[in-house]
């Protein structure tokens, strides 16, 4: 049994149970519970939209959680969506993404929202993720952040009536309200 309170490395992380989902944040194993169905609904909508565009334009590889992204020996995350450009495919290993992806998407959940907006935002910026989207199911918005000087800068916050544009996926657009509509409507 692994002591989840001790400082851990990627090697320790690999020994965790397949039955429980963990992330490794600054050496601390953090349990990631299964997301709510609405979260999964939004994930599917976003993944379908991005996947079609990435494939059509042969831009790179797209993955969804659970996919390990090893940022350092003490930082391993499982973002909801990960995009790695064709030019940077050397960071793709058989078992994980070894390094900062070009684009990371996190869909906020009640249990992870604080980490996604603080700790993980800082990790992604520090390790060089180019673009980070924070999807807020409650507010029905998507905040797009771009890498600045070792920190992210808000490129835009998109909501109802807006068309989200991605600087990293040049030319990609999606109507934001389509990501949130028609979920369990009678």
Image: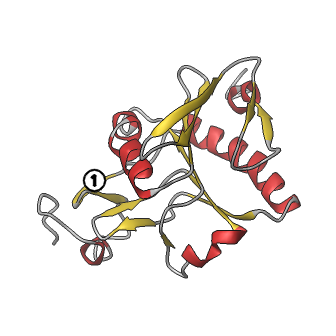
Few, some or many residues within 10 Å of mark 1 (<14, 14–19, 20+): some
- Seen at 69% across and 49% down, the residue is 168
Which residue of the protein is positioned furthest toward the bottom in this rendering? 94
Task: Where is residue 171? Give x, y as percent.
Answer: 83, 44
Q: Quadrant of residue 52?
A: bottom right
Label 1: element kind: strand
Horizontal side of 151 relative to 88 (left or right) equals: left
Relative to residue 172, is residue 47 drawn left or right?
left
Disc count in the image?
A: 1
Q: Pinpoint residue 93: horizontal percent, then vertical percent.
A: 54, 80
> Is 128 placed above or below 131 here?
below
Residue at mark 1? 30
Q: Residue at x 45, y 35 (%)?
A: 109
Quadrant where the N terminus is found in the figure:
bottom left
Residue located 32% across and 43% down the image: 119
Quadrant the C terminus occupies: top right
Which x, y percent locates residue 183?
Answer: 68, 29
Query: In the figure, is residue 71 to the left or right of 175?
Result: left
């Amino acid at each position: 049994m692994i002591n989840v309170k001790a400082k851990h490395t990627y090697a320790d992380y690999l020994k965790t149970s397949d039955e429980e989902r963990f992330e490794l944040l600054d050496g601390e194993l953090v349990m990631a519970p299964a997301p709510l169905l609405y979260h999964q609904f939004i994930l599917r909508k976003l993944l379908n939209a991005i996947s079609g565009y990435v494939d059509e334009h042969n831009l790179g590889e797209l993955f969804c959680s659970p996919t390990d992204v090893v940022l350092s020996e003490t930082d391993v995350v499982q973002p909801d969506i990960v995009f790695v450009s064709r030019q940077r495919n050397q960071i793709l290993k058989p078992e994980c993404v070894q390094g900062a992806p070009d684009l990371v998407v996190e869909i906020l959940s009640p249990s992870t929202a604080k980490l996604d907006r603080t700790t993980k935002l800082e990790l992604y910026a520090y390790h060089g993720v180019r673009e980070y989207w924070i999807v807020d199911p409650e507010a029905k918005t998507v905040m797009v952040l771009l890498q600045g000087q070792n920190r992210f800068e808000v490129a835009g916050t998109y909501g109802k009536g807006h068309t989200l544009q991605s600087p990293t996926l040049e030319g990609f657009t999606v109507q934001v309200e389509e990501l949130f509509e028609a979920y369990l409507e009678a």
